[in-house]
Structures are given as C-alpha cells and as structure tokens.
Amino acid sequence: MMGLFMAIIGMGFLAFALDVGSLFRQKRMAQAAADAAAVAAAKEVFSGNSAANEQAMANAVAKLNGFDTTLSRNPATVTLTTPTAGAFKGSTYVQATVARSITTPFMASFSSRFATMRVTATAIAGGFSSPSCVCLESGTGEDLDLEDNATLNAPNCGVVDDSASNNAVYISSGATLAAGSLGTVSTTWENSSNISNGGTISSSTNIIKGITSSCAPTMPTPPTFVSSSCKPDPGNDGSAQAVAFTAGPASATESICYNGLTLGANDTIDTLSPGIYIINGGYLHFLSGAGSQPNYGGNGVFFYLANGAQVKIEAGANVNLVAGGNKTSTGQTAPSVGSGYDGILMYQSPTASSPNQIVITGGSTLFMNGALFAPSAQVTFSNGSGTTVEGGIVCSKLKVDGATLNANANVSEGTLTNGSPKLVQ
C-alpha cells in the first residue's frame, strides 16, 4: 500500500510537471506568434497599406507560428490595435494580441479546454519622419520641463531630446505637449512616471524612444566684429533716458555692434531698424512698460549674443521681434538680413565657455517670429500667458512655465525618423 501510495504521489508530480511544462511551451509559442504578427502588421503600416492588409498579414504569420485563425475548432484570434497610453503610443505603433484556449496533457483528461492563453506584442511601424523644430542637446538629465499650464505646440514638426536619462522629459501641473512627434535618445524614459499632476501629451504625438540619431543641426557662421568698435548702449541700460531712439545698421544686410542694448526705458517706444545686431558681452534688455505699446520696428532683425551677452525680457515688457524674411504680426514679410541668418532671431555663441540662459519672464506681451539658437544654454519662458513665439529652438535645455510656445520648422534642424519596422515591446 505504501508503494502504491508513493506511486500515485509520483504520478501526480509527473502530471504537474508535464502540465506546467506544456503551459510554458505554449506561452512561448503564443509570444512568438504575437511578436511576428505585430512586426508583420507594422510592415504594412510602413508600406501605407490598408487595415485589412495589416490584419491579413498578421493572421498569416500567426498561423506559421502555430496559431491558426481559420480552424473550425478552437481557432486562435489575432487582434490589432493602436496603443493610446504608455511609452509606446500613437499611430506609428501597432499592438498585436494573440489568444486561444489551450489544453495540457493531464487536465485534458478532465476538460478539452483548460484556459485562454493571451499575449501581446508591440512594434513600431517605421518610415515615419517629420522635420525637427525643437532640438535639446544637453545629452543628460531633464532637457524638457513644462509646468504650470504651459503649452508647447509643435503640430507639424518634432521635438528631439538628446538626453539618455530616464527623466529626459517632464510635464506637470496642467502643462501640455502637442507635437507631431517626440523622439528621445533615452530608452528608459517612461511617461507614466514623468507626466504628472494633470500634465498631458496629446494623443496625436508620436513618441519614439531610443532614437539612434541625436539632434545637432549645423549652426550658421557667426558674424565677425571687432570688440573695440562696438558702440555703447543707446538705451543707457535703464537710466533716466526719456527720449525714444532708433538703433541698428544702415541697411538690413549690414551689421552693428553694441556693448548692450536696452529698450523701453521710461516707457519709450524705441525703434529697431532691420539688420544684424551683435551684442558684445552686455544685455539685450527689454524693460517693462513702453506705454503698453509694442516696441515697433523690430521686423527683420538678427541678434548675435557674443562674449557672454545675455537676454532679459522683463515682466510687462511689450516686445515685437521678427527674424529676417519671416512674417510680421500683420502678415507682411520682414526684410531679409542675408548671410544665412534669415529665419533666425537670436543666436548665442556656440563656443561660449559659460553660456547664459535666455530668459523671457513675468507675463511679457511678446510676439516673436524666428528661431532661437542657443546650443549650449538653457532657454526659459515663464509666467507669460501673453507670450507667442513662432519658430524653432535649439538649446541645451528648455523650460516653459505658464507660457505658450508655438514651434515650427522655419529653419532646418534636421529630420526625426524612426527607421524600419521593429519590435519594441
């Protein structure tokens, strides 16, 4: 009796081992079928084929991996969806779910169907590309920070983040990112942990993690100048200057160098003539006020920030700045400044050893149409509900706090491409 009892126990363990082994084997087969189905469907998306073709190819490769959807008895099912949440969401991703009722050697003696095996896989379609209009070059840490109901709109172009860190992008406190795409060098960034407190990324934003090509557009050649020939600040840097003045070169294609340039002192409405402005070591400073009027005349301008020059736009400043060749606030075309600077509004020296931030703060009423190039520095927009900026940005880090930033690819910053179809999850 003892021998018989031990034999029964041994047979039970054997049956358990056979069933568990069978379950693991069938799950591996199902996962292989789901992986293959996801990639096959992604290839159809890459080729621009119909949803029916996607499903047909997914069913075909699932059948080759042992999960036949055409069987009359216990057929498999292959369901294709577009992920709407998580790190891999958007129209460039395809999720395949493979399911079928399974049996095991021992449990089959009691029931023909033991349980439903269901597994999923996600593939990126590839072939997607969009022009880049926000290029963040620091390479580490938090490169994009949107907070306090800030909005970054870039519907027709891509945001590219060179940071390899898991906190590369942070969106919080009601802020919104609405871009054509968001590409991160980081493969570990997760929007589940970095999007919080009402922060959102629009469902139309294609999120591409682990991009292989970082963003580093070619910078224009800096204008040449001699420091000793630079003129003093005509605005006296906020002193009791009561008379409005006109600054700038003689023509739009010429340059002029100032050791600082302050506008709006004592509510004056100062005029910026079209042309190339070199700010040598001082401030490009827009003071608050200006009689609640914009600083007219800033159409067709390009500012080169040399030798540690800084930008400061204060609370209440009323500013109108348009790059050469771009559209003014009234829809006219600003004069061309030439020398490869058209479309660029501000350019901070890329070789600056200690680059200063470009800071636009305090509820400024601001209209800017032109790209900001500060590849080694942080650009900050804060507390500026009236801020409107049209144009691309190249910087080390970008922070938008309570402001609206509208980015577009008016100057070439390269193209964000997600390559060929491949499995991502």
Image: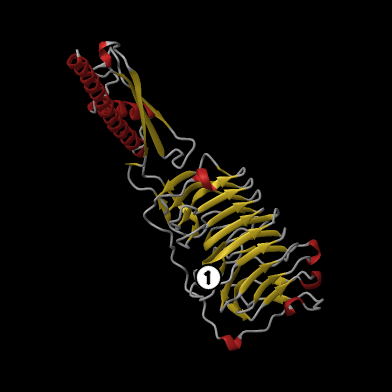
Say if residue 213 shows up in the picture. Answer: yes
Disc 1 is placed on an element classified as loop
Q: Position of residue 401 (x, y in %)?
A: 64, 55
Q: Residue type at mark 1?
A: Gly
Foreground residue among 144 and 275: 144
Q: How is the image coloured?
A: secondary structure
Q: With 328 as the anchor, is 418 left or right in this view?
A: left
Q: With 238 as the anchor, is 171 left or right in this view?
A: left
Q: Position of residue 233 (x, y in %)?
A: 69, 80
Quadrant of the rendered image containing residue 55 = top left
Q: Which residue is mark 1?
A: 338
Q: Which quadrant would the C terminus be assigned to in this image?
A: top left
Rendered view: 182 above or below 44:
below
Q: Residue at the location (48% across, 63% down)?
A: 138
Foreground residue among 395 and 234: 395
Rendered view: 420 above or below 30:
below
Quadrant of the rendered image containing residue 308 = bottom right
Quadrant of the rendered image containing residue 196 = top right
Q: Which quadrant would the N terminus be assigned to in this image?
A: top left
Q: Position of residue 74 (x, y in %)?
A: 30, 15
Q: Position of residue 175 (x, y in %)?
A: 62, 47
Q: Residue at the location (78% across, 74% down)?
A: 244
Q: With 37 as the anchor, is 325 left or right in this view?
A: right
Say if residue 71 shows up in the picture. Answer: no
